[in-house]
Image: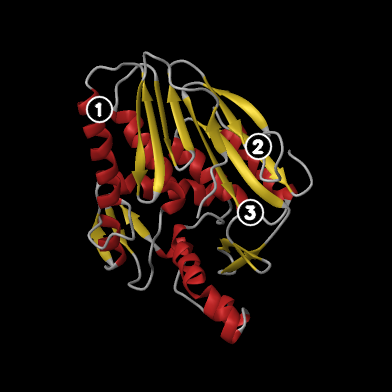
Amino acid sequence: MFLVFLFLLFGCSPSESHFHGEKMLMPYEVRTDSRRHYRKTQELIDACFERVNLTYNHWNPRSELSQVNNSTEQSISSDLLELFTLSSQLHQLSGGRFDPSMAPLISKMKRDAEIAHAEYGWEHLIHEHIDAGWSKIRCAGNRIDKPQELKLDFDSIAKGKAVDLIFETLEHRDLYVSWGGEIRVRGRPRRIAISNPLGGEPVEIVELKDSAIATSGSCIQTWNEYSHFIDAKTQQPKKNSKILSVTVMAPTCALADGLATAGMLFDNISDLQGFVKKVESEIAGTRFWIVTSQSEL
């Protein structure tokens, strides 16, 4: 399950073409500034999603990422190398908290949560060790070396990367691309409402122009007192904290997606605010919105 924290505040204008559907169980929406070449545009959108499926989708046994996960040494495409490079940047910015090698632990949590809670108790699950850790991966040029047991899952940035891929493929002057709530726009500004996970009025209505926005939150997937995020330092599920959601505006959607996820990995608001200050000072065009169990920051 996922929750859409961001939504567009206007309908389709008469001069726009509107494309929408569902890919990999998540809704997508694309709006362009022209009604010409409708079929060709749809073909390009479909081709982008197929490229994502064949490159980044760890659930697809034929994908490039699945091949990497089943090997110890392999040359990778420029598409996948971009995600490795971005992940390394996010890992460093977050002090090691952002770590795609931890994601298989999350999958195991989801798969075993009901059995673990009902039959064995939660503690056996969170103490079970799985080989993971970004520092165990070596990347030289386009070649990746890693332990056989180490598996990678780029879901935390692949959705944003798919939005970027569609955005960069289509050449329309005015463009709106959204998949699963992650958004990137070009041309005229779009008014985007940031939903409040506590309910009520939106956190803010943002005028998004030539930028991207993404949200990560913990209010949907939780098990007892644990969230669906993994602490990379302990390799255990993070306990639920006062941080409910992090929304990020950034130049690209993959970056916004990754920064939002990284923000949710902090244990306390003070450390998160230090991370926000560091990112906003080092990466032009970034801005954060944080919702806690007490208020918005």
In front: mark 2 or mark 1? 1
Q: Earlier in the sequence, mark 2 or mark 1?
A: 1
Residue type (three-letter) at the residue carrying disc 2: Trp
> Residue at point 57% right, 61% down?
228
Q: Position of residue 56 (x, y in %)?
A: 32, 52
- The crowd level at tag 1 (other Cα within 10 Å; few <14, some 14-19, many 20+) is some
Quick check: 183 left or right of 61?
right
Residue type (three-letter) at the residue carrying disc 1: Thr
Quick check: can you spot residue 52? yes
How far, Cα to Cα, is label 3 from label 2? 16 Å
Of the numbered discs in the image, which one, if any, rests on residue 276? Answer: none
Quick check: 16 left or right of 43?
right
Q: Position of residue 77 (x, y in %)?
A: 24, 48
Find disc 2 in the rendering and name its residue: 289
Find disc 3 in the rendering and name its residue: 219
> In front: 13, or 185?
13
